[in-house]
Image (cartoon, rainbow, N blue to C red):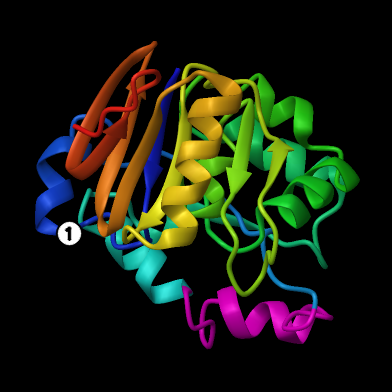
Amino acid sequence: MTNILLEGYEINAPWLFDSLKDYIRPFQKVVIIALAFRDTRVKNLDDWNALYEKDHGCYYSGIVGSLADYGIPESEIEFINYFADTPETANQKIRNADILYIPGGLPDRMMERIREMQIYDSILHHEGIILGYSAGAVIQLREYHLSPDKDYPSFAYYSGFPFIGDFYLEVHYEGTPEQNASIKRILREKHKPVYATHFMNGAIIVDNGTVKSIGKVSIFDCQPCINR
């Protein structure tokens, strides 16, 4: 299995493209698991369409266009729609996919919706590539944390998928006091390294257990605390 942990949906950015083209190949089938939306923003199908629908979705062209640069046509890309798919149709899309693509948003709500739609096991047993950014990156960890921000006022640990268990991930790293305090807390409590992908400029590939950093990624080691 290959897990790709990203900062945003511009997966065709020049600093990423050469590394990802070995994994994202022409005419692979991709399913977008678009379940991380905020409840205050998306309350019905029309709201969901405003984000991800083909003709008017504000994220649609960015996601599909970036995949097109890897030779994946629009015809090979499907979305899981929380308001339109059933567990049966959603699971079938996942089973047919070479790549599971998980966008960002609220990771804890995404995990709740994944279980609600009964697609947890299909994702868990996927044998291809799982690619996600922001929330879609952190849920690939057995346990992930969220540093305090406008959505999550308090630090907390959460359960994700048991794909990666050797490190923690700080996304959108800008060296803020809140982020640095979170990293120190993890090192103290969990005794595992923290990989911090810098804001829109860092990525991680975990290829069958081998970890590769792309762009700007700071690694905070366990005791003694070392930033390299």
Instruction: Residue 142: give x, y in percent of width and height.
Output: 63, 25
Based on the displayed image, in which of its 4 quarters is residue 74 positioned?
bottom left
- The residue tagged 1 is 13
Residue that protrudes farthest toward the right in the picture: 116
What element does badge 1 sit on?
loop
User: Residue sitting at 77 percent across and 25 percent down?
Assistant: 121
User: Residue sitting at 29 percent across and 43 percent down?
Assistant: 203
Based on the displayed image, in which of its 4 quarters is residue 163 positioned?
top right
Camera-side residue of 221 and 136: 221
Q: Does residue 228 appear anywhere in the picture? A: yes
Q: Does residue 76 appear anywhere in the picture? A: no
Q: Quadrant of the C terminus?
A: top left
Q: Is residue 46 magenta?
A: yes
Instruction: Residue 83: give x, y in percent of width and height.
Output: 82, 67
Q: Quadrant of the N terminus?
A: top left
User: Residue sitting at 80 percent across and 75 percent down?
Assistant: 39
Residue that protrudes farthest toward the top in the picture: 209
Based on the displayed image, in which of its 4 quarters is residue 68 positioned?
bottom left
Camera-side residue of 169 and 80: 169
Instruction: Residue 226: give x, y in percent of width and height.
Output: 27, 28
Specify the segment rendered in magenta: 40-59
Camera-side residue of 179 and 84: 179
Q: In this view, does 18 lie to the left or right of 131?
A: left
Q: Is residue 51 magenta?
A: yes
Amino acid type assigned to the residue bearing label 1 in the image? Ala
Instruction: Residue 44: give x, y in percent of width and height.
Output: 83, 80
Q: Label the magenta part by its dominant secondary structure.
A: loop
Q: In this view, does 40 lie above or below 28?
A: below
